[in-house]
Amino acid sequence: MKKFGKRRSKLLVFLLLLCMSAGCSKADTASEKTEAATGERTENVTEEALAPENPEGKNDADVKALQKIIEEQNASGADMPTFLDDKAYKWDENGRLTELNIERCKLQGELSCKGLSALTHLNCVDNEITGLDVSNNIELMKIYCDYNQLSSLDVSNNTKLEVLACSYNELSSLDVSKNAALTNLNCGHNQLSSLDVSKNAALLHLNCSNNYLSSLDISKNIVLTRLNCGYNQLSSLNVSPNIALTELYCGGNQLSSLDVSQNTELTALGCEYNKLSSLDVSKNTALRNLNCGLNELSSLDLSNFTEMDLSLQCDEDVEVLWR
């Protein structure tokens, strides 16, 4: 019995050691699995952090077209943002790119917006663009392309266009006859010798200053409130139909006469540096700013105003009659 007890004790010890060994083996296997899983998760996290932006929810065609513009321009030295959720790019709830704001991004050569069919707003001001293709962007409502090197600009397909700002370029012609919805046009500081705005009846603001215009017909623009046609080659200007005008700047031309009797809403009038020998502002009692210097005036009747009412700039030798 004692021998059997000893054998039994040895057997129990052996079984105990065997279980402990098996337990350690399982623990080691579990530990290895845990370490492997942890390592895999760490690797995945690192890969996700380095992965490019996922344009989930964005229109595939718009993403492709935008990425093409970014790649082409940045390869030429531009610095367009590569992150598609940058404030330069505005997407609507349907994932369509509606606004492209790439002002001062060192853009060069031709900028083609082909493929961005939902685009409504384009701002590419102050770059070095020599060509701008917006012929396929029929939803465009606003174009700002001032301060570039454009020698031509075709907006004939942009019939929804309301704002066109293309000043400080090299445009020798500009056709806005198809842009009936246009309310704001700034084409100043170009090389225009003519400008037809007869089809733009909705026009509120027009700036065509610093060009080579010898004539300007605004008889169809009866809702016009602000006109700057200064520093051209105008020898005459008829603003009688434009009774809504509140600001008129026509300085730096060759005007020998100017009738503003119908423009009773005028608050600012700049007609300096012309050939005016007389100027009647008796009907313009809303005037608050008047610049008529460098003309051929000998006298100026301001008996409807006081010096407190009106800020005046005119030559020192002009005899001014105040109230």
Image (spheres, rainbow, N blue to C red):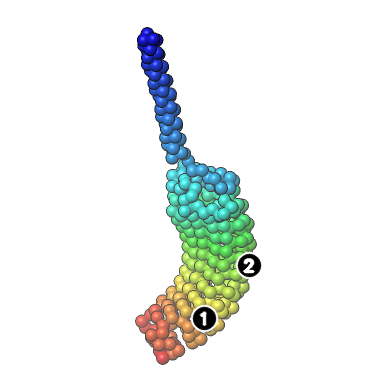
How packed is label 1: few (under 14 Cα within 10 Å), some, or many (20 or more)? Answer: some
* Residue at the image point whose x is 49% and y is 55% from the top: 101
How far across and down, in percent of the image, does residue 73 sit?
Answer: 48, 45
* Residue at the image point whose x is 47% and y is 46% from the top: 83
Q: Nearer the viewer, residue 92 or 228?
A: 92
How far across and down, in percent of the image, does residue 64 sit?
Answer: 56, 44
**What numbered label is drawn on residue 199?**
2
User: In the figure, 103 relative to 291: above or below?
Assistant: above
* Residue at the image point whose x is 56% and y is 54% from the top: 92
Mark 1 residue element: loop
Can residue 108 be seen in the rendering of this structure? Answer: no
Sequence-earlier tag: 1 or 2: 2
- 172 on left or right of 288: right
Q: Amino acid at mark 2?
A: Lys
How far across and down, in percent of the image, does residue 306 sit?
Answer: 40, 87
* Residue at the image point whose x is 55% and y is 60% from the top: 142
Q: Nearer the viewer, residue 188 or 93?
A: 93
Q: Nearer the viewer, residue 230 or 95?
A: 95
Q: Amino acid at mark 1?
A: Glu
- Total residue callouts: 2
How packed is label 2: few (under 14 Cα within 10 Å), some, or many (20 or more)? Answer: some
Quadrant location of the N terminus in the rendered image: top left
How far across and down, in percent of the image, does residue 215 sit?
Answer: 56, 70
Mark 1 vs mark 2: in front: 1
Question: Which residue position holds label 1?
Answer: 265
User: In the figure, 163 relative to 271: above or below?
Assistant: above
- 194 on left or right of 16: right
User: In the figure, 122 relative to 66: above or below?
Assistant: below
User: In the figure, 6 relative to 129: above or below?
Assistant: above
